[in-house]
Image: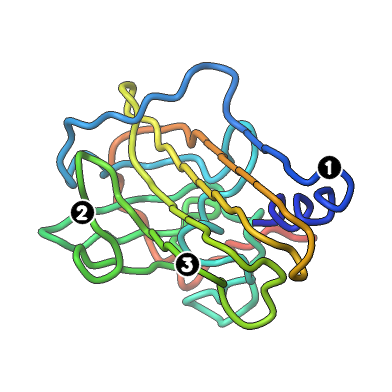
Amino acid sequence: MKKFIWCILLSIIFSGCVFHSEPKDEVNISKAVQLESLSGVYSNKGDPKGLLSEILFGYLPIRSMQNDLEIQHNEIDKINVLVKDNVVTAEAIANECIIYKKEYINGKDFTLENGTITLKSDFFILTRGSGDPLVGPSYEKIELGIDEKKHGIYKYQLYAAGLVFLFLPIAATEVSEVRFARLHDNMKYSNCSNQTHIREP
């Protein structure tokens, strides 16, 4: 999304742009997996960049379950993904302790199709909402899955065309792919309520 804002600014000069970011080696999301296949412990730091916790929990700092302290996303080491029936639980792990977790329900918070979780899929005919400088059709999609080596894959797609500020034509494309290394299978982590689990500044 940040790249898309830059794209609008650059369009004043070039009237169009394309952004594409991906790991050095090829990304292939496996299509023949069940929801349970997503279980595992993943690195929070992505390749080439990005944090899995920001994708799962939002970009604002989160609050520790133990003491309500504010936690920055770069303090999180890994994400433990647990699957039971149609519920996916993501646990944020720092210093081997659970500091935050959130549940996602299949059919409510995401959809699963061909082994890929879709967190968001929106198509807009005219505008994306109040304050949007672009008037014209746009499409935005966010997906999560695993590759053939069971590493986590995040894919963001944005396509837009129309008029910026009602006078400047633009065609923009943004595609970002991030790999989050699978560290090992699920582990049972403690809440560590009596331990200091946040790194000192």
Residue type marked 2: Val
**Mark in front: 2 vs 1:** 1
Q: Which mark is residue 14?
A: 1
The image quadrant where one finds the C terminus is: bottom right
Q: Element type at marker 3?
A: loop
Count residues near mark 3 (Cα–Cα under 10 Å), then give few for <14, some for 14-19, many for 20+.
Answer: few
Residue drawn at x 84%, y 48% is 10
Is residue 189 or residue 52 the one in the foreground? 52
Q: According to the image, label 3 marks what residue?
A: 125
Q: Nearer the viewer, mark 3 or mark 2?
A: 3
User: What secondary structure is found at the residue carrying circle 2?
Assistant: strand
Query: Is mark 3 in CB contact (under 8 Å) with mark 2?
Result: no
Q: What kind of residue is marked 3?
A: Ile
Point 34% across, 30% down: residue: 29
x and y percentages locating residue 45 in the rendered image = 58, 41
Question: Which tag, 3 or 2, sits closer to the chain's start?
Answer: 2
Quickly name the residue at label 2: 83
* Colouring: rainbow
Q: Where residue 36 sits: x, y (%)?
A: 17, 45
Name the residue at the front extreme.
167
Q: Gap between marks 2 and 1, in whole Å?
A: 46 Å
Q: Residue at x 47, y 66 (%)?
A: 124
Q: For this rendering, which residue is in front, 83 or 56?
A: 56
In the rendered image, which quarter is residue 58 located in?
bottom right
Residue at the top extreme of this rendering: 25
Q: Callout 1, which amino acid?
A: Phe
Label 3 vs label 2: CA separation? Answer: 36 Å
In percent of width and height, residue 189 lies at 36, 55
Q: Residue furthest left?
A: 85
Q: Position of residue 190 (x, y in %)?
A: 37, 60
Q: Secondary structure at mark 1?
A: helix
Q: CA distance from mark 1 to mark 3?
A: 24 Å
